[in-house]
Each structure stands twice: as structure tokens, then as C-alpha cells.
Amino acid sequence: MPLLHLVIVLIVVGVLLWLVNRFIPMAGSIKSILNVVVIIVVVLWLLQVFGIFSFSSFSMMNVGKWSY
């Protein structure tokens, strides 16, 4: 992904989050939760874009084998 697209996506997400926080009436706790969720999703997406984190690594993890 070109760097310009990355910057544009970050700006769009930031503006949308600002618009939601500014113009949609919500309780302060809901706004805080929304902000945290958006920031976590954006950070995970950035880590995946730069190749530091991969969601496919979760499919390779074995927690245990279930036998029925």
C-alpha cells in the first residue's frame, strides 16, 4: 500500500471519529469506548500493513486438541 493511501485512510478515519464525537450526542462513557475501539482497530491495521502483525498467525496457534 503506498504511503499516500495510508495517510489518506488515517485522515479519513480521524475526521470521521471527530465528526461522530462532535455532532452525535452520546454519553461520555460510550464516546470513550468508541474512541478506544477505533484506536485499537487502527493500530492493529497499521501493524498488519507494515508486516509486524498478522491475523493469520492466530490460525496457526493450537490451544489444545479436543477429542470427542
Image: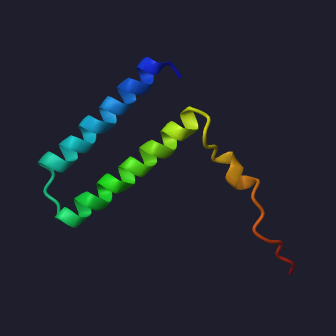
Residue at image position (87%, 78%) is 67
**Residue 46 appears at what percent x and percent y?**
49, 37
Q: Identify the residue at the far front of this view.
A: 52
Residue at image position (43%, 43%) is 42
**Residue 20 appears at what percent x and percent y?**
21, 47
Q: Identify the residue at the far right of this view.
A: 67
**Residue 45 appears at what percent x and percent y?**
50, 40
**Residue 11 appears at what percent x and percent y?**
31, 30
Q: In this view, does 8 lie above or below 18?
A: above
Residue 42 left/right relative to 28? right
Residue 32 left/right relative to 50? left
Residue at image position (21%, 42%) is 18
Picture colour scheme: rainbow
Q: Quadrant of the C terminus?
A: bottom right
**The image quarter in which residue 48 lies:** top right
Residue 45 left/right relative to 34? right
* Total residue callouts: 0
